[in-house]
Image (tube, rainbow, N blue to C red):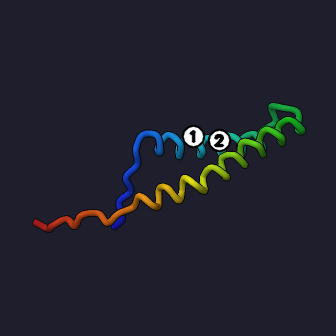
């Protein structure tokens, strides 16, 4: 099993990018704004969330290590 060590800043970035991507998708599906505004804001939030996920994924996957074996007692 692999273990990932994340600090508070990395965790906040992961949560923030997921929230931005989710908000973008929500705006694309909602009808609260004019369609042009909604599409522009939605695609922008989604794109920023998706693009910032790539370096975070590399950073998180680079911090993986083997978890210590647990003994069956």
Quadrant of the rendering where the N terminus is positioned: bottom left
Residue at 45 percent across and 61 percent down: it is: 62
Relative image position of residue 51 (x, y in whole percent) = 67, 52
Given residues 39 and 4, the one toward you in this image is 4
Provide the secondary structure element on which disc 1 rests: helix
Q: Is residue 18 above or below residue 57?
A: above
Residue at 88 percent across and 38 percent down: it is: 35
Neighbours of disc 2 within 10 Å: few (<14), some (14-19), many (20+): many
Neighbours of disc 1 within 10 Å: few (<14), some (14-19), many (20+): some
Relative image position of residue 52 (x, y in whole percent) = 63, 49
* Left or right position of 46 against 32: left
Given residues 20 and 58, the one toward you in this image is 58
Residue at 68 percent across and 40 percent down: it is: 23
Relative image position of residue 49 (x, y in whole percent) = 65, 47
Provide the secondary structure element on which disc 2 rests: helix
- Find residue 20 and name its label: 2
Residue designated by label 1:
16
Q: CA distance from mark 1 to mark 2?
A: 6 Å
Q: Is residue 73 above or below residue 15?
A: below
Quadrant of the rendering where the C terminus is positioned: bottom left
State the residue lying farthest toward the left: 73
Label 1 close to label 2 by CB (< 8 Å): yes
* Left or right position of 68 against 11: left
């Amino acid at each position: 099993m692999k273990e990932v060590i994340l600090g508070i800043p990395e965790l906040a970035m992961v949560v923030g990018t997921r929230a931005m991507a989710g908000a973008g998708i929500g705006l694309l599906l909602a009808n609260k704004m004019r369609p042009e505004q909604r599409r522009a804001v939605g695609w922008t939030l989604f794109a920023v969330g998706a693009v910032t996920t790539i370096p975070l994924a590399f950073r998180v996957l680079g911090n993986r290590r083997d978890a210590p074996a647990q003994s069956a007692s």
